[in-house]
Amino acid sequence: MDQYVVDLDKNTCSCREWDLNGVPCAHGIATTHYKGGKPVEEYVNSCYSRTAYLRAYDNLIQPINGPNLWAISEHEAVNHCGEEGHNSRTHNRNIPPKQKKKTQEASGSKRKTKSKAAKGNKKVGEAPNVSL
């Protein structure tokens, strides 16, 4: 059976779980119940408190109106390609797909094949020639 040393004054346990996450481990909780002192909640790190949570989210970014409520700009929209009806985001949507390249057979070129010497001149099921 493993034994762990719990120090309630320093909020530590030798298993190091309490040290790592700031919440009492099972050994720390058992020790607080055995000693009968403060409630377990008082041994939890202050970063988990309600006040710390509210402080962290105190400066939230406020929501803004949607695009339908935005003010209309006096400036012209930027059009990089010079064509009307689309912008840089929609520029490539109406372009027809690229033509596939012709295959070698259709273009009349012959595929290169290995010579019989390069293949090793072996028959199916025959062991390779290995010289030691």
Image: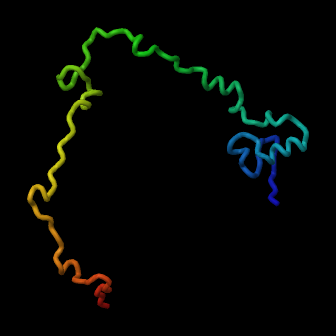
Q: Is residue 64 above or below residue 39?
A: above
Q: Residue at x 10, y 61 (%)?
A: 109
Q: Residue at x 80, y 53 (%)?
A: 4
Q: Position of residue 32 (x, y in %)?
A: 86, 41
Q: Position of residue 100 (x, y in %)?
A: 18, 47
Q: Position of residue 42 (x, y in %)?
A: 80, 33
Where does the N terminus fall, quadrant-wise?
Answer: bottom right
Q: Position of residue 60 (x, y in %)?
A: 56, 21
Q: Is residue 62 left or right of residue 115?
A: right
Quadrant of the image occupied by residue 80: top left
Q: Residue at x 21, y 39 (%)?
A: 97
Q: Is residue 15 above or below residue 119?
A: above
Total marks in image: 0
Quadrant of the image occupied by residue 108: bottom left
Where does the C terminus fall, quadrant-wise?
Answer: bottom left
Residue found farthest to the bottom: 132
Q: Is residue 10 above or below residue 47?
A: below
Q: Residue at x 67, y 27 (%)?
A: 52
Quadrant of the image occupied by residue 91: top left
Q: Is residue 80 above or below residue 70?
A: below
Residue closer to the observer: 38 or 73 = 73
In this figure, which colouring scheme has been used for the structure?
rainbow
Residue closer to the observer: 62 or 44 = 62
